[in-house]
Amino acid sequence: MRAKGAEMPGKDCVKVAVRVRPFNKRERDAGSRCIISMASSTITIQDPRNSQSPRSFCFDYAYWSHSGFTRDCSGLYIPEEPGGRYADQGSVFQDLGEGILENALQGYNATLLAYGQTGSGKSYSMVGYGPNKGLVPTLSDKLFQAIRANQDSRQCQVFFSMLEIYNEQVVDLLSRGSRSPGGLRVREEQQRGFYVEGLRRVPCDSAPQVEQLMEQGTRMRTTATTHMNANSSRSHMLIILQLKQIFSEESITKQSNINLVDLAGSERQRVSGSEADRLKEGTAINLSLTTLGNVISALADVAVGKKVVHIPYRDSVLTKLLQSALGGNSRTVMIAALSPADICYEESISTLRYAERAKRIQNRAVVNESPTERLVKELKAENARLLQRLSRLGQEGRRAEDETSRRWKEGGQRMKPWTLWEQHLQEALKDWEQQYATITQERRMMQMHPYILNINEDTQLSGVVKLFIQEGEWDIGLSDSSPRSISIRGLGIQDRHAVFSNVQRRVYLTPLAGSNVVVNGTPISQKTELQHLDRLILGSNSTYLFIGYPSERGGDDWSRYDYDYFQSELAAAEGINLHSLCDSSAVPSQTDPSLLAVFYDYIKLMPMVAEANQMSQELHKGVEFKLEIKNLALSDSKGHDLEKEIAVRVTSLENKQVWLWSKAKFVNRKFLMEELYQQHHTEQKGEGAARAPMPRDRDPFWDPLEPLLLGSAHLWLQSLAFRIALEEQLEVLGSEGTEEAILQAQLLPCSPTGLTLGEDDILIDPSELLGRRLDFQLVLDQCCGLRWVQQARNRGVQIGFRMFDSAQPLYTPAVWHNVNPLLDQRVHFTSLHTSQGLLEHLQTSALVLELWGLQEGCRDMVSSLEGVRMTPEGCFIIDQAGATETATTVDPGSELSCSLKALQQDVEELRNTNAALKTENNTLRDQLNTTRTGAEWGRGRSEMRGSSLRPSCDAEFARALKVFYHSMTSVRVQLQRLRRHRPSEESDLLGLRLFVDEQGGLLRDFSELLEQSVSSLKQDVAAIVRRKRERSGIWS
Ligand SMILES: Nc1ncnc2c1ncn2[C@@H]1O[C@H](COP(=O)(O)OP(=O)(O)O)[C@@H](O)[C@H]1O
Ligand SMILES: [Mg+2]
């Protein structure tokens, strides 16, 4: 479908198109739903969590490339049926490309921007893949066609440049020399505006020439990415086509710049409050993109008549270079690329909002024409300057000068401005022919020898580098000193990393000492024979696909061996796959999308962690990174066991300090590390004068120490609903299921003054508690076998917990240097009027006791008493919904200071009254106890209690319940143990068999326990019922 919207008012508004691509593999795996729909040029997006409120946006063009397509024999994606709604590359070009071409031929500057999250299809639209050529190659094709068609009326020059902006550095992707450290400079001139100084401009006169330059640029981008240890999704790629047209009849010259921009991925790491990093977001991680957003917003405001003081073009390299494209002298088009999937909703809606703003921008494009005379004058001046420089270069220059001046003299007036350009063109063509020969040679080699093919996270950069393994032995590594070496760069690659040997049409790979070589997910240490399509990882993360001899190749599809495939394979070898993440044996196709997200997070972070480790090692940072899957069930009071999250554990090798970083924090730090690493290398290459070491508080490898959540234990509250005392030995489990400690804890129902209740007070029907006061104490006696302290003695722990609706968690005081520390903590909780909510909570939930690890130099966790309500006796009030009147609030922030004073007086009075009452109460209690004990000796105590007392059968029943409840606790513990029981990562077949046996044993124990508990309850109940009937005389 290719829909054109209504003509926008003011013809120089930025034109905006949106395009939605097919599902990718991840999305299909996740069983994603398509949340985008289109009608004419309106696009509608559905929030997957809220079906009520679809949002609609209207753009100039909306392209449906999600479905309704088929692949023809040449690999081209076309509509399933003629006139179908699928928008192929051709129809996108018709609307957007043709317009740009026309504008350029008329002498306007033109800009095309592709915006969207990584993987949304920006490069597909801009550059294209294989036969599905994108806007740039088609544009150049059509441009040269047009030039040929108009040959009689004008003469044209085309210059091609290609650059990348990464981390605010400009890299010339066509540069032939070595890369200048720090990149090229962006300069400003009155006439020209901003431009990149020293950027190579290659004259072109045919489309194949442009395509080849693009290929060359992409190859350069691929190697630059590895050299800078960078990630292409964070870089912007700019192609600049300059078109100069000379109309000799009219004696005018028109010039236009066509900027074609494939922007960096628009996604952000969303950092929520608690995860916010101490170090600011990687300085330039997205500076250009952020600034682009700010510029667009400011311009959109200008368009609607708001007063805008300043448009921040100068804040980033990208916006400097695009200044004329945005609000200036250019006709600009933006294509916003979208994923169709529900899991990308947040990113997609943010892309649409961005595009919505962009379409308001108004430009003032003018035809750039000037009399040819002026151009001739300018060119003469330029030529003179160049000739001077050439002649300084000696003989060579002399010859060139002669040649040029000869041509100048020979040529008619019309020829003059062309000489230098033609000369450049000739050089470029020579270059091109050379490159062409190299490519032809490479094609021939591919048909003769095995080779390895680079696989990049960015599909656009995959398969760009081919390294041939001809007969004999070949060293692969950083070094290129010998003619028999294959030189590669990358993190963790050694000078001599491994040896390929190709003997009798078999290829072997032998790692050299200390180097990391992984084949099909498994590290190898010995000579290994390679098979066609084996996956190789060299060093930290240089990934290659091995392509065997042509005879072995067949017609297989290599595209499935993408970057994800490599990483999943590696993760699987570490025991992480979708299967292991799910507790049940759910098949991946039914996998919970959140688990799938965790899995993809894991394989995304895995190579980054490897790289961080390598950088830490090379920079002598002494820290090690490790991925962890945190089971959030540990902090869930219902013990639900599904949610998982990725975290990175950072350990200092020297003193075993430990940090736990969130995913977002790690990603940010990784970028800062790259920056530091890059800087380090540039300096090493430079004068060698080492800079002062980085201050610790700016070091991305370092953080102040913080208490660490080691694990948690669940203390089930159900017994409180029956007012049964509970004493437990709890297993404190770490996030990966390890036993961190044993915690001895008690829950004691008690009187308001803290006297423990006995069996007499057991309730049979918990609803009796409703509306009544409930008091109980939590006792934390001791922690045993603390793994955290066993690992390093200079550590300590604290226990933290939050009871029901308390606003703040409470922490026990820190205990240090002890594997089995006494805690001896007792906290009294009170609900003044037990609510239904509390009762339900008691019956279904657990108190989560968190074990926090302290390290030398980190601060303790302190219980904040802000907003905490207490009874005058100092009991913590919970269940506030049920209790408001008698409680006092510790609220220092109250602004009503006089009423506070009055309140304080009231409190004081209440406290006094209360103390008096308490004394009276105690006396009464003593008296009552003496009477009761005395009476019990004589008559049944049940009769003593009036309506609230229960017959002795009930007491027996309560006792039976208590026993049952206690046994259920062990059943529950056993069940949890079973659920967390996993085979060890290294298990072989024997190990697995042992595991199964063990599991069987645990199951048997579990069922026995359950059986026992239930049957003893049955017996007890039967006995009670029998006795009751006996007593009521039925059987007497
Ligand atoms: N319109 C489309 N039709 C078919 N495949 C597409 C389309 N757009 C993107 N893709 C595929 O999606 C993947 C990611 O696209 P790409 O353009 O590289 O994303 P980006 O440049 O935004 O990161 C590529 O494998 C590409 O082939
Ligand atoms: Mg891309």
Image: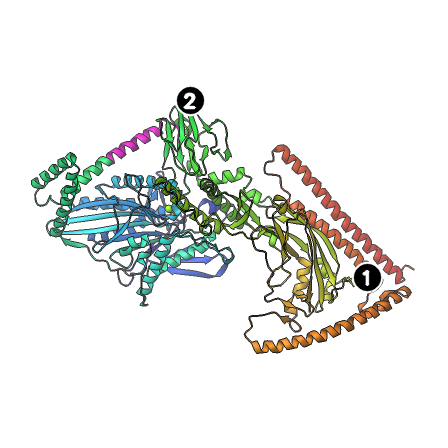
CA gap, disc 1 and disc 2: 88 Å
Q: Vertically, is 441 above or below 748? A: above
Asked if residue 261 lies in the magenta stretch, the reply is: no
Q: What residue type is labelled 2?
A: Val
* Name of the residue lying farthest toward the right: 1036
Q: Can residue 547 be seen in this view?
A: yes
Residue 533 as seen in the image, left or right of residue 864 = left
Mark 2, residue position: 503
Q: Residue 954 carries which label?
A: 1
Asked if residue 436 lies in the magenta stretch, the reply is: yes
| Label 1: which secondary element | helix
Q: In which quarter of the image is residue 533?
A: top left
Q: Which of marks 1 and 2 is nearer the N terminus?
A: 2
Q: Position of residue 297 (x, y in %)?
A: 35, 61
Magenta stretch, residue numbers: 432-451
Label 1 Cα neighbours within 10 Å, binned few <14 / some 14-19 / many ≥20:
some
In the foreground, 508 or 377: 377
